[in-house]
Image (cartoon, rainbow, N blue to C red):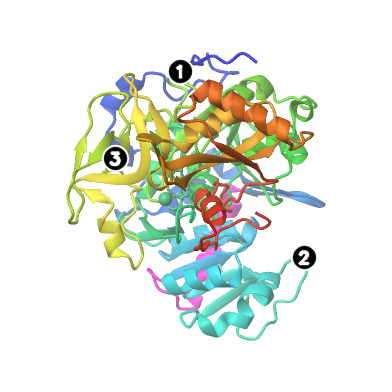
Amino acid sequence: MNRPAVIHKTSPVGSVKPHWDDYEGERSRFSWRKARQALSGMPGGGINMAFEAVDRHLDTPTRDSVALRFVARNQPALDLSYAELARQTNRFANVLEGLGVQKGAHLFVLAGRMPALYIAVLGALKKGVVVTPMFSAFGPEPIATRINLGAGEVLVTTDVLYQRKIKPWRQQMPSLRHVLLVAEEGGLTQEPDTLDLGQLLREASDAFTTVNTSGQDPALLHFTSGTTGTPKGALHVHEAVVTHFQTGRYALDLHEEDRFWCTADPGWVTGTSYGIMAPLLQGVTSLIDREEFDAERWYHLLAEERISVWYTAPTALRMLMKAGKALAQQHRFPALRFVASVGEPLNPEAVWWGQEVLGLPIHDNWWQTETGGIMIANTPAFDIKPGSMGRPLPGIDAFIVEHLEFEGEPPRVRVLETPDVEGELALRANWPSMFRGYLNNETRYAKCFAGDLYLTGDLARRDAEGYFWFVGRADDVIKSAGHLIGPFEVESVLMEHAAVAEAGVIGKPDPVVGEVVKAFVSLKDGCTANEMLRMDILAHARKRLGPAVAPKEIAFLPVLPRTRSGKIMRRLLKARELGLPEGDTSTLEAGA
Ligand code: ATP
Ligand code: MG
């Protein structure tokens, strides 16, 4: 495979001209004040996410375009136009109004990727109600913990999920006043102490005047993935929509004629910021697949649904790579013109794979639940350096900092100006989708700031051309014989081996060198774990990384433990290796 260190930005694919191609110029012209003006704002002077995403289109031809297209196995596709989405979300807002739910109250959604989820999220935002979508696969305990932390007043869920995950524990969620049930496949919604959402929607008016929320009113409470510890509840406000709008253009290059597929579930921030908000703001058609990952199905959907912009995650890409090229080569993707990825470091191998199999490189981008939107990205405006997460978007100032020796709080840091030095990634906290707090955890929130810099907890380096390279999470970095080893570098090298599908690397305590590198790998379909293969992978790593950084041990696992948002949980690999307690596993994907 041809593996260039730089993939040059290409001329536009098809007739669509990218939104930008002058990185420096656009950065110098950009201001968040001007960015706000690109949106309508409320007639009363405020700003409301759902108004911008849905109602703003009603006076334009977009109102008749498909906003959301739901597909599922064994069911016909369901298309909702912008006009229909406006009516349905109005109905939902009226249902809340009828129940006496006030602005600022908290609503949770526990449902698969079905229309009711999207209608509830947008309808609640219209009413000024704060929303949290949860993964439907969560067990009862993580659900109750989240609802209690957010003092959830309303829950939208399905009859099946209610019976399995809520009903027996309902007494433990005293704040819950209303449970609105959606019938799954013709089921019953006549549970005591619940309401039939379908019936309430039918009875409600489809006219509603969206509440004139201020940009600073809370809108969404998102929980972090729980990769490094107990998930934290990050609160976002309505003006975050300005970031969703701008980044949808800069980092995903969304154009109104696009057919967009964001594979993330709204239970993870990506599935809301980019699975709901950003595409609606740009007036595009979004595909929503109600099924779980399946390599064959995904290729089929990309091709048959004529997806033009695709936003996915490294885990999914690695699973596609694991399934082999032959499967991909059974399909053609002529409509596809831009592919992006988020959630974990994207190994260079995956960027080149995209080039070879999809005919397009994959644009890695970096952000967090806390940042609410994409901050650093590979974009159409400049060349890709595979393995780098790209450059800060217009309006985002990113730095590499080191902590100063200082025992107290808040932390103190020094900005490292020299390129190619590793340190903590920090951002000047001045963009609209910046989180406004960790719910019930002021102390933790305060620890994230040094003056006006937000400290991300990730380690990175910046090269002379302003590209940022992810090194590892501060918690995952390995200290071995005076070296600081970032797991990403080691994992990427392991991934170069033809048999390796996935790799997770930890530091294992060692009396002599502090920590030694231990790798866990899962193999590509058709490869068998044996001693010869282990030696071969070790030899490859040693050749590429040198003996100080290469793993000393390699263990084979059928799958690596990961969060429901697809992140390898290195802390769990470590806890299991050392026989320590596993800690919070509420977001662990089943079977891992
Ligand atoms: P928790 O904070 O609960 O431990 P989490 O940090 O995984 O979980 P998210 O907010 O979903 O929760 O993930 C953000 C983190 O994901 C980032 O801080 C970073 O470590 C990682 N990440 C996201 N995108 C990238 C990327 N493109 N490259 C490298 N790392 C990434
Ligand atoms: Mg985090």
Residue displayed at 63% across by 82% down: 168
Residue 90 on the magenta segment? yes
Could you tell me how far apart the alpha carbons at marks 3 and 2 are, in whole angstroms?
46 Å
Does residue 489 lie above or below 94 as drawn? above
State the residue position of label 2: 185
Q: Which residue type does callout 3 highlight?
A: Leu
* Image mark for residue 383: 1
Residue displayed at 34% across by 22% down: 463
Disc 2 Cβ-to-ligand 1 distance below 8 Å: no
Residue extent of the magenta highlight = 81-105
Residue displayed at 26% across by 39% down: 33
Q: Which residue type does callout 2 highlight?
A: Glu
Neighbourhood count class around disc 2 (C-alpha, 10 Å): few under 14, some 14–19, many 20 upward: few
- Viewer-side label of 3, 2: 3
Q: Which residue type does callout 1 highlight?
A: Asp
Q: Position of residue 30 (x, y in %)?
A: 29, 30
State the residue position of label 3: 427
Neighbourhood count class around disc 1 (C-alpha, 10 Å): few under 14, some 14–19, many 20 upward: some
Residue displayed at 64% across by 55% down: 113
Is residue 252 shown to the viewer in this render? no
